[in-house]
Amino acid sequence: MLGQPYRTLASLRYAPRAILILEDNIELHGDLHAQLSNIKSLVKQYGLIKLGNIFERQHVKIQSIDSTYTLISNLKGACGTSAYAIAPDVAAQYLAKINGFFEPVDDFMDNEWRTEQTLYSYHPQLVSRSQASSVIGQRKVKGKLSLINKIQVEGYRLFKQLRQKQYNKKHKTQANRY
């Protein structure tokens, strides 16, 4: 994790309460203001709540939030950190796990098996990434990879999938899968 996300987590660990993080290119799908009290209580209980994901994934239902929203936990990384609320203790926990890892913050957070923090998300999403351009920049700029680099990438992807399956088996029930 590099740059601004690291500095943000470093400052959050000393915050007196949970903080809502919003990127510059979000689109609201519901009334965020009306959900603030729900978000506050959910973060107090679970530590981190994502308000939307890039991908729709198989998930477990955690609890009903209200008549519109459900709290879920994805069984595979759903990516995206456009909008989330995080408690100071979770920020500190992430900082303790960062050492030696240099990857986008959403990829880091999606690795629940590494961070030991289960991710919880609003469903349907309350916020998504907007189609408007962002000042954050382009993340996926990839040149041609050599065969060895491709093997390394795929090997690491397989490793992450296996670790996530182990984490799910230990921390997420089968009964509520959707």
Image: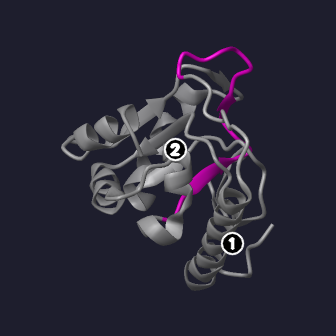
- Magenta stretch, residue numbers: 118-136
Tell me the quarter of the picture where residue 93 sits. bottom left
Q: In the image, 152: left or right of 57? A: left
Whether residues under marks 1 and 2 lie with C-beta atoms below 8 angstroms apart, the answer is no
Q: Which residue is mark 2?
A: 104
Residue 9 place in picture, x, y as percent: 32, 43
Residue 124 in view in this figure? yes
The C terminus sits in image quarter: bottom right
At label 1, which amino acid type do we have? Leu
Residue 66 in view in this figure? no
In the foreground, 65 or 164 = 164
What colour scheme has been applied to the protein in the rendered image?
A: one colour
Q: In the image, 88: left or right of 62? A: left
Vertical position of residue 166 compared to residue 135: above or below: below
Q: Which residue is mark 1?
A: 158
Vertical position of residue 22 compared to residue 99: above or below: above
Is 132 a magenta residue?
yes
